[in-house]
Image (cartoon, rainbow, N blue to C red):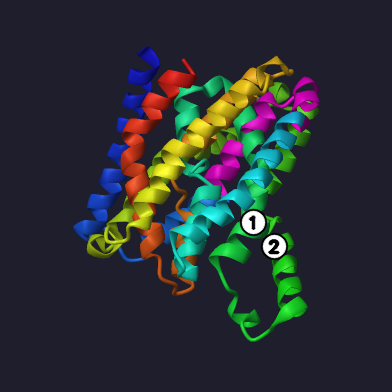
Amino acid sequence: MNLFLATFNQMGFLFLLIFIGFILVKIKILPEGSAKILSRLESYFLIPAMVLLKFTEEFTVERLSTSWLTIVISFAIAFVMIPIVLVISRLLTKNVTERNAYIYGLCFSNFGFMGNAVVDALFHEIMLEYVIFTIPLWTLIYVWGVPFILTEREDTASKTGNSKAQNKILTSLKALVNPMFIALIIGVILGLTNVYPHLPENFFITQVVKAGNDCMSPIAMLITGITFGTMNFKVVFKKPGIYIASAIRLIAIPLIMFGVFSLIPIKSLENGDVIFRCIMIVSAMPLGLNSIVVPASYGKDTSAAAGMALVSHLISLATIPLFFMLVLA
């Protein structure tokens, strides 16, 4: 019960920030495009700052010995989930745009914006392991989710066959050279060389990185609210698939993950208990916002993704505290 109340309190804090972002859009204090600008701030500075700080402070040679297992398990779960989700999405709709929204939403939860915020507040001691666990998910988003599911590049629209696929693959690989992965590499080097304890107290660079880390969660939630504030609710609530997909994302997937990894003795592995908690946390999160923001920038219909995002985030206010109480207490 204590974990339920703590989680519910944290969810209330996050949803209040979401509501503030929503209201700021509705009363037209924020200009059009605010979500896109803040998302870039989050992606190019705040999340990299969090990643850099965690790895610099906590990544050691001892952690290196267990990190490979965390990454392998994360990749394995994703590769098992993807074909299952492809089948489910075909049953939900015949519309290709809507189907892609369901594919992305069921494959990738909001493990970044909301997941980071929840873990940092409730399970701060496993934050580094959580970031490591999500590395494969970020990789799949960059090399498959965004270029192959959410977007259709205008400069390749006229191409067909191998030429088009090769162009997308090249673009995907280039996308891996981004601030978050660069910060990760720098953080790993600094962590393994044990640089952090030898830096001057209140070193100005460290203070900037810490400030970015502290802003990461609040800004992420404001972005969520701002994004919701631009939605046409009359349209997004009319699609029945969003309710089925939201139930799968928030109820079916977490319960299946719990059942599978209760049968598999993952906790008996080195660092297995932490890996188990990371799996449960990622699986419990609602739909990520990339399925709205990215297609919208290409002029695509985002009503299905917007509906699923809104419905799943609202339902998660109850499901996440309950799920955490049942499986993580």
- Residue depicted at x 60% and y 31%: 130
Q: Is residue 203 visible?
A: no
Left or right of residue 118: residue 313:
left
Residue 224: x and y, percent? 37, 49
Residue, far front: 91
Q: Are marks 1 and 2 in contact (CB under 8 Å)?
A: yes
Residue, far left: 27
Total number of numbered labels? 2
- Residue depicted at x 70% and y 67%: 171
Quadrant of residue 1 within the rendered picture: top left
Q: Any mark on residue 56, and which? A: none
What residue sits right under mark 1 in the picture?
142
Can you say whether 67 is above or below 315 in the image?
above
The magenta segment is 45-68
Q: Is residue 190 visible?
A: yes
Q: Earlier in the sequence, mark 1 or mark 2?
A: 1
Quadrant of residue 235 within the rendered picture: bottom left
- Residue depicted at x 30% and y 49%: 21
Q: Is 303 in front, or is 213?
A: 303
**SS at mark 1 in the image:** helix
| Crowd class of label 2 (few under 14; some 14 to 19; many from 20; radius 10 Å) | many
What residue sits right under mark 2 in the picture?
172
Q: Is 111 in front, or is 242?
A: 242
Left or right of residue 207: residue 169:
right
Amino acid at the residue labelled 1: Tyr
Whole-angstrom CA distance, mark 1 to mark 2, is 6 Å
Amino acid at the residue labelled 2: Ser
| Crowd class of label 1 (few under 14; some 14 to 19; many from 20; radius 10 Å) | many
Quadrant of residue 195 within the rendered picture: top right
Residue 282: x and y, percent? 53, 36
